[in-house]
Image: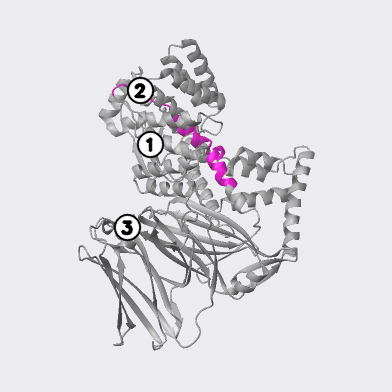
Amino acid sequence: MRALSRRTLSFKALGFHLGVVALSVSGLAASKPTLPEKYKTWLNQDVVYIISNDEKKAFLQLPTDNDRDNFIEHFWEVRNPTPGSPDNAYRTEHYRRIEYANQYFGHVSHTEGWRTDMGRVYITLGEPQQRQKLLGLQKITPMEIWFYQNSNPALPPYFYVIFYQRETTDEYRIYHPYSDGPEKLITAAVGPTRQQALNIIEQDVGNDVARQTLSLIPDEPVDLSGGTIGLASDVMLATIHDLANNPMTKEEISNRRRLLEDVSHRIILGEDFLDVMTVPMRDPGGSTSLHYVLRLKKPDDFTVGQSEKQGYYYSILVSAKVKGPDGKIIFSDDKKISKAVSSADFDEIKGKVFGYEGLLPLPPGKYKVEFELSNLLTNVAFHREIEVEIPQVPAKGLAVSSIVPFVSAKAVDPRGPGVQPFTGAGVKFLPRAGGELRLTQGEPLRFFYQVWAPALANSADKNKSIAVDYVYGRMGAEDNKTISDQIPLNQLDPAGSVINGKQILTADMQPGNYRLVMTLHDPDSGTKAYGSFSFSVSDSSSSAPAWDTAEENSSGAEADWQRASCYLALGNKALATDWFHSAYSKEQGNERYRDKLIELYFAQQDYAKAVDLYSRGGLTDSTDEQTIVRLAESFSKLGNLPKAVAVMESGTALNPKSGSLLLGLADYYRRAGEISKAAAAEQKGKQLMAASPVS
């Protein structure tokens, strides 16, 4: 454990912030500089689809090439999935997409591939999960359908993008269901009606494609018999077109920038320097979470800062990226923690290895989790990626978590806020970490585990107990010993879980490698559950003691949102909806929570619940355009056309430059018989759409 002078750090930080201030002032005072060609190329070609208007404005105000180079470096670093790593996977993938677009698109009109509609979508969203080409059909224009399984919160989880070639000399262009309609896809000299066009598409290429021409969103209800088209697909395409300026995208970039604002450079160290230990546990409500500890391997790997007036302090950044088995990110949990350390506490932790304890609200399933622990005082980061499985809770019988060796345990108030890492039944455990458990002879072996037995919680005979046998001994030697234990059923919480701890003395154990096997017996069914782990006993001292910092509380609205996101990624929309609703009920001012709930209710055709959410908050300047469309259509489906018109009017007032919303408003005016208003809104909407083409 090293103490670092705060004075040195303060001058570094002060220099950085003064540099930013001076840069802003000089940029505002000077006249707009002429941009050298290489920076024009970077701004107007390389990052044209991923840079926000605010970032572009800031870049154009920079007075020197050095400032521009620093801006570009920071631009990529903020988006780096592993900040500080010289191998920026985001930047590498972005330029690969540009190269691919230039190689495969734009050949018909000799246009640079990145400028085409296909190029723009490919660069923005990446490789689609599926591609379907429809060529050589007599009555239908050449088409290509891309299917995306998306992880961007601003877009639906699944959607299509359709491209069509109107003339053989044209590049493929994006098809807009509402603005174009299926009739645009038919080659007949005399334009067919919408229903005729749908019939042709259905006969020649199938019902699925006909449906996709009405809606690019699989969950959206469609009207194949009447050919009515909603606005949601066109709004989604507008979101893709301007994804860099979407509020959710900007919020994500802002959060990453805020978390990394103190980091100018970092050294990334791998698994040789960081231990990770995880265990799935259930809370009193029956929900599963992954408890984890990130533990450095040496005391000197962590540095605490020192201030003459304020004692000691530390500052860390912890990031946990939760991915599905396919590697797609479900959510990212980022925390920046800065705490003061008293002189007495510093003397206590000196010489101990540092660790961070946290938990992730993961429902049953398989995941990949990428951990990174950064010391912001030294700009050193420690990185590990692991695979974990949260098991299903058995309907019958019992299951047991993995066994967790611990150093110490202390009583805590069970009424404390939320679920805390490695805490249960009023006890906080300090876990051990590392692949090998080494004990000094005489040092007790302490461990705990959690039993899951929901059916036994309702057992008619509460006087029964779960019998537990612990068998341990040296591998290859005949010195096994057995200890028996009982867990009374009346200790189970209402969800049917209980934490049990055990201590085994090692004073009489000979040095060597040991194996412990635990067997639990279900008193009702007679079935068994097992657990095991290895440990070693030696006559020399064991590893250095540890000290951990931990999450303060992880049971709020954001944790519910994360759990809901997992259920959605796992395909369980019903439970996802329940948990999104729980998040929104705890934080009703959060527009992101409400948007997602409305999206799910609309997909389930539960229009009454969607409009109920509208009644609680109305529209704000942060309301997503797709949410506005879904709310208007929900009112329309419930027979309240005047309210649908009012929602669209409010939406266009909040988003006056949205051509797609104005076209939707024109349609609602038309349905309401307001023909002159419909014509005016349609004209303005078409003007805006023409002024801001997708390509």
Write down the residue under mark 3. Answer: 496
Query: Majority secondary structure of the magenta segment?
Result: helix
Q: In the displayed structure, would residue 441 be above or below residue 95?
A: below
Kind of residue indicated by mark 1 = Glu
Residue 228 within the magenta-colored segment of the rendering:
yes
Write down the residue under mark 1. Answer: 144
Residue 331 within the magenta-colored segment of the rendering:
no
Write down the residue under mark 2. Answer: 228
Q: Please state the extent of the stretch shown in magenta in the rendering.
A: 225-254
Closer mark to the observer between disc 1 and disc 2: 2
**Left or right side of 546 for 145:** left
Task: Kindly tell me whether residue 107 is visible in this rendering.
Answer: no
Question: What is the total number of numbered labels drawn onto the structure image?
Answer: 3
Q: Are marks 1 and 2 in contact (CB under 8 Å)?
A: no
- Give SS at disc 3: loop
- In the rendered image, which quarter contains the N terminus? bottom right
- Give SS at disc 2: loop
Callout 1: few (<14), some (14-19), or many (20+) C-alpha neighbours within 10 Å? some
Q: Are marks 3 and 1 in contact (CB under 8 Å)?
A: no
Q: Position of residue 609 (x, y in %)?
A: 39, 32
Kind of residue indicated by mark 2 = Thr
